[in-house]
Image (cartoon, helix red, strand yellow):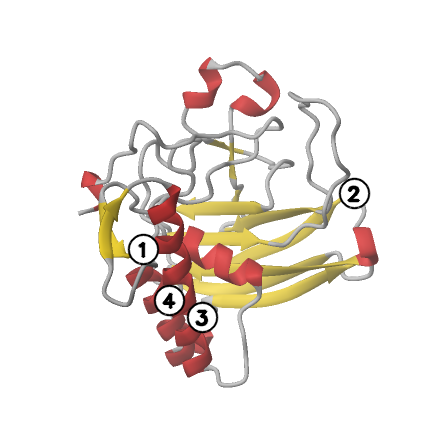
Amino acid sequence: DPSQAVLNNFSACGPTDDGRIKPDVVANGDALYSSLGGSNTAYGTYSGTSMATPNATGSSALLIQQYSGFFPGQAMRSSTLKGLLIHTADDRGNTGPDYKYGWGMVNVQAAADLIRDHSASPAKQRLTEDQLTTSTITRTLSFVSDGVSPISATLCWTDPAAGALATSDSRSARLVNNLNLKIIAPNGSEFLPFVMPFVGSWTQASMSLPATTGINNTDNVEQVRLAPPAAGTYQAVVSFSGTLVNNNQNYSLLISGSTAD
C-alpha cells in the first residue's frame, strides 16, 4: 500500500540551490533486512542510503535485464531508465513532484509493466527515444486517448555538465540544454509541465508548496498529467529554448494513457 510509505525523519530532502527537484525518487531504506558482504549467508537489518540505494539500483538492474529480454541487442539510454523510474513511481507527499519524495516511490512492477506493454503494443507509443538538433528544433508525437485512462507524459534527458560553481546558494539555473514538453489536446488546449513555486520566489516557505504548472527552465525532467482527458488524438511536443550545446540533445519520452488504435 503506497499510502503507508512515509518519509523517514533522517531522509535528506531537496532542493538544490537553483531549485531542481531532488531527490528524484525515494525507495525503502528503513530497517531493511537484506544481504551483507561478510559471507554468502550473511544478512542484517540496516537503515539509510546503505539500503535505499541498493534497493533502487538492484531494481534498475532488473529492469535493464527485462528490457534486453524483450529487445535483444538493445539497451535503454540512461535517460530512459531514469525517466522510467520517475514516470512509474507512486506519487507521495504533495500531488506531483516535491522536495521530500521527489517524483515518488519506486514502483518496479509498474516500470516492468510499461516495458512489457511497450513490447506488446508499440502503437501505444509508450517509450520513445529521439533527438533534437539545431536543424530539428521540434518533434511531435501523436497518440490516441480512450478518454478514460489518465494521460501522463514524462520527458527526460542527460544534460551536458554545467561549469563548476565556487559559491553556494546560487539561484542561477544549472540547466545547459533547456528542453520543453507540452501536450496539445484535440481541441487545441495546451498543457504544460510541473514547476516548483520555490523557483523565482526563493523563500523557505515555498519549498513545501504543491507544484504548479508552467514553463520549466530548471529541471532536466518534465512531466505533464491530464486526468481524466477527453477522447481523441493528442500531441506530445518536445522542443528547446535557447541554443543546444554540441548542436544536439538526445531525449527519452514516456507516455501512459494511450491506446493502440
Name the amino acid, label 2: Gly
Name the amino acid, label 3: Ile
Question: Which residue corresponds to the image point at 23% horizontal and 57% vertical from the top-left?
Answer: 43
- Taking the image as shown, residue 25 lies to the left or right of residue 190, namely left
Is residue 56 or residue 100 the one in the foreground? 56
Distance of mark 1 from mark 3, alpha carbons?
A: 15 Å
| Residue under label 3 | 64
| Residue under label 2 | 242
Is residue 207 or residue 143 the one in the foreground? 207
| Residue under label 4 | 114
Distance of mark 2 from mark 3, alpha carbons?
A: 34 Å
Asked if 66 appears above or below 36 in the picture, the reply is below
Helix, strand or loop at disc 4?
helix
Classify mark 4: residues with Cα within 10 Å, few (<14), some (14-19) or many (20+).
Answer: many
Distance of mark 4 from mark 2, alpha carbons?
A: 33 Å
- Image coordinates for residue 163, horizontal then vertical, percent: 77, 38
Helix, strand or loop at disc 3?
helix
Q: Earlier in the sequence, mark 2 or mark 1?
A: 1
